[in-house]
Amino acid sequence: MREAPMRSFAFWSLVTAILIYMTLPTIVVLMTSVNPTEILAFPPQGVSFQWYEKAVTYRDFQVAFKNGLIVTTCASTLALIVGSAFAWLVNRYDFSGRRVLEAVLWSPLIIPHFTLGFGFLLLGGAFQLQQGYVMVVLAHMVLVMPFVTRAVYVSLANVDADLSRAAANLGASPLQVLMRIELPLVLPGMAGGWLIAAVLSFTEFTASLYVTGSRTQTLPVAMYNYIREYADPTVSAISAMLIIATTLIMFIADRAFGLRRVLAIDTY
């Protein structure tokens, strides 16, 4: 009888250790961002918010933030349109090559990002589009589209097909069924998928390092270039702001759209 409590204690001890291990880097970043000295140090030797001011006013970061918003908006919106269409196709129709299509759609989840980035760099060179917005947006779209497709697919799977059949039996056209029945039910999944894609696109670094240039560099690339020359806590301040902003966005989105259901953590 004593083995069960011991197993439970060992399990929760392991879970606690894993959570501490995963959150410790975040805590270190948050603490070093308020260090008053010009050298990264942990634990901090005081509290100062001067690096947050520098992060907001530094010209390269301002431009990179604007570039990131442009790329994120375009890539996430394109991923939403294309990913939703593919999710609808895979969920609603049974056809030859369906499994192959699904494998292609999920492949960016297992292919290293630097491989995709290098591939888009070569592709951009072949079409004379290297280091322009087009290649950056396309690369980000491919990287985040599986998350949109997954979110929409789960939402579609939880839609009662009898609702569509009932609407069709009452005389609704396929377009009316889509616009008035299915689309409103899937909209939370689409919104949640777009939001996840936007967060991932804005913070994407590995592939962006290959496809961005001086005019199109995103914020993570600008942060990388900054730490190659300086060792002050400015980058820690930016990282802390990104951590806080992402946490708030995901919390609000979960309350608004139910991301646990969108990601199939909970069922309807």
Image (tube, rainbow, N blue to C red):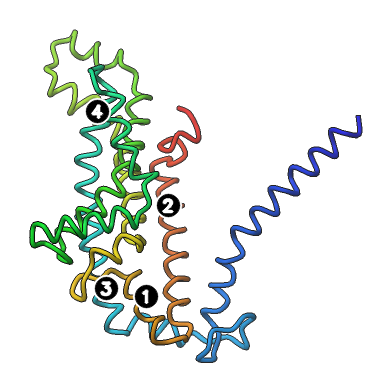
**Badge 3: residue crowd in 10 Å (few <14, some 14–19, many ≥20):** many
Could you say whether the residue bearing mark 2 is in a helix, strand or loop?
helix
Q: CA distance from mark 1 to mark 4?
A: 38 Å
Q: Quadrant of residue 229?
A: bottom left
Q: Give the mark, 2 or 3, whose residue is nearer the N terminus.
A: 3
Residue 74 is labelled as: none
Residue at 23%, 18% (x, y): give it. 96
Name the residue carrying label 3. 64
Name the residue carrying label 4. 88
Name the residue carrying label 2. 252
Name the residue carrying label 1. 223
Q: CA distance from mark 3 to mark 4?
A: 35 Å
Q: Is residue 194 left or right of residue 263?
A: left
Residue reaching furthest right?
2
Q: CA distance from mark 1 to mark 2?
A: 27 Å
Residue reaching furthest top?
169
Tell me where residue 56 appears, x and y as whole percent.
Answer: 35, 80
